[in-house]
Amino acid sequence: MPLPLKLTGTIASPGFAHGPLVALAASVPTKRRSRGAAEETAALEAALARAVADIAALIASSSGAAADMLEFQMAMLEDDALSQAAFAAIAAGSAADTAWAAALDEQIAGYIAAEDEYFRARSADLRDMKDRVLQALSGATAARPPAGAILTGDDITPSQFIAADWSQGGAIALRQGSAASHVAMLARARGIPMLVGISDLPAGGAAMALVDAEAGSILLHPDPSSRAQFTIDQNAAAGRRDQAAARAHLEAMTSDGTHIAVHLNVAEPDDLEAIDVATCDGVGLMRSEFLYSRGLPDEETQLAAYRKVVRWASGKPVVIRTVDAGGDKPVPGFTVDESNPFLGLRGLRLALAKPDIFRVQVRALLRVAREGNVSVMFPMVSQASEYASASGIFREEAQGLLARGIPHAMPRLGIMVEVPAVAIAPELLGEAAFFSIGSNDLTQYVMAAGRDNGAVAALNNVTHPAVLALIGNVVRAGEALNIPVSLCGDAGGDPAALPAILAAGLRSISVAPAQLPLVKLAIASMSIGGQA
């Protein structure tokens, strides 16, 4: 009998599960030979139509996040820009399946290479669309995984998740994947445990696996003592979740009576569907990148998305970040190719370099600002002149809206503190209405260790004294300048890092919705000195 093998990964959806480890089906292979450009073109057109029809049928029987995800895919498939390269390859002599696979693989590679996790996560949707059309071309039918299994592979597509029978439990364990993927969102909504980034996960199956997506581990071939401990841990986690749920509507307060403001990080409006606004202090970070995942969104599209979150907040603060694209993020007509995207034209730098595109977003933000307690945050700011230029564009666009009689309001304009130069000398940005520390980028820049590079993961530590010293420096500068300071990076949702963050002086954090109850519970066990 094989010895027990414990592996670790990143938690995409918490929970516990046990069952056989079952490998997900591989992508549909390409087999066709070209029968001429006219016939191959007709075949791809028919396959696209069938794929759209299949998705439409699924939408009719779905709701919430699943329906929204499927609508996203259908819109992508109906966009001629997605298939343009494939039809061009067919005209040059390729078979329909080869042309489609090559066109999608190129786009998938661009998304995977993106620095921003939102864009990387969308690569699974593109793989799903690729396979759906290839199945239509080949006439193949996707196999349904067995109920109660631990599904494993490099990644999982939304269609594979929807097709699985989760009525008897089960979980997902991936060698790659993303906690920001549509499948991860679906898993959290359904309560299906999911781990990603398990690089050493074997390709084959296993008779039994235990998934602890509270601790971020999976145990293959468990022995009796491991199974017994797993049951103990599962019951203990259930008790913690019950405790956290009971505190969800209570104020976040340390054991020695200090209030900690806990806001939410929102990747897209649907993240808030199942969240009661009474459980949080507002939205500390609404990312706008999802609007750019298919190209450049118009003003009305942006306004509708921002309005949905502002209305949900019901008067509580909402901080919307201007688009944080740039470098290697695939936004056609906006981003540029660079040799070093981490240090290139990204965030506010890119927005100022492409003002016509930026101004569309500015107008939408000005219009939604009159409807609630809205602030706007500029990413990747490194000097005061950038803040001044962006603020000037807001004032100019406000004048334009006023001249046209369009209702609007000027939001508070603040910055993300993620560039070490700003964290070292925050007083140089003293005109900003607020500081919000982006702990993810700040840490990787201070430690010179990429946050998504497993080889240097141990170096990428927000509790390193140098990182904490800079956080403390920003907090002290905020106090001296009377500028509010918060933290919107992942560190705010990490109970292990929270004591050090509070000890550095922070009293306002922003976390992913799924982390909110357990973060409140963790805060309740801490003193203001950061000791549990």
Image: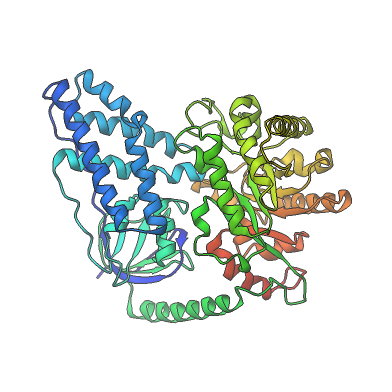
In the image, residue 192 lies at what x, y percent? Answer: 39, 66
Whole-percent x, y for residue 332 in the image: 47, 28
Expressed as whole percent of the image width and height from the top left, the position of residue 121 reads 44, 46
Q: Residue at x 50, y 25 (%)?
A: 333
Left or right of residue 526: residue 155: left
Residue 120 in view = yes
Decide: is 215 above or below 94. below
Up-down relation of residue 163 to residue 213 (above or below):
above
Q: Is 373 on the left or on the right of 19, as rendered? A: right
Q: Nearer the viewer, residue 334 or 326?
A: 334
Q: Position of residue 301 (x, y in %)?
A: 52, 40
In front: 496, or 475?
A: 475
Relative placement, left or right, of 480 versus 52 is: right
**What's the residue at 76%, 48% (across, down)?**
434
The residue depicted at 26 percent of the width and 58 percent of the height is 163
288 above or below 2? above
- Label total for image: 0
| Residue placed furthest toward the front | 405
Nearer to us in this view, 310 or 514: 310
Quarter placement of the C terminus: bottom right
Q: Is residue 168 above or below residue 428?
A: below
On-image quarter of the N terminus: bottom left
The answer to whether one can see residue 132 in this image is no
> Image quarter for residue 149?
bottom left
Relative placement, left or right, of 50 versus 198 is left
202 or 422: which is nearer to us? 422
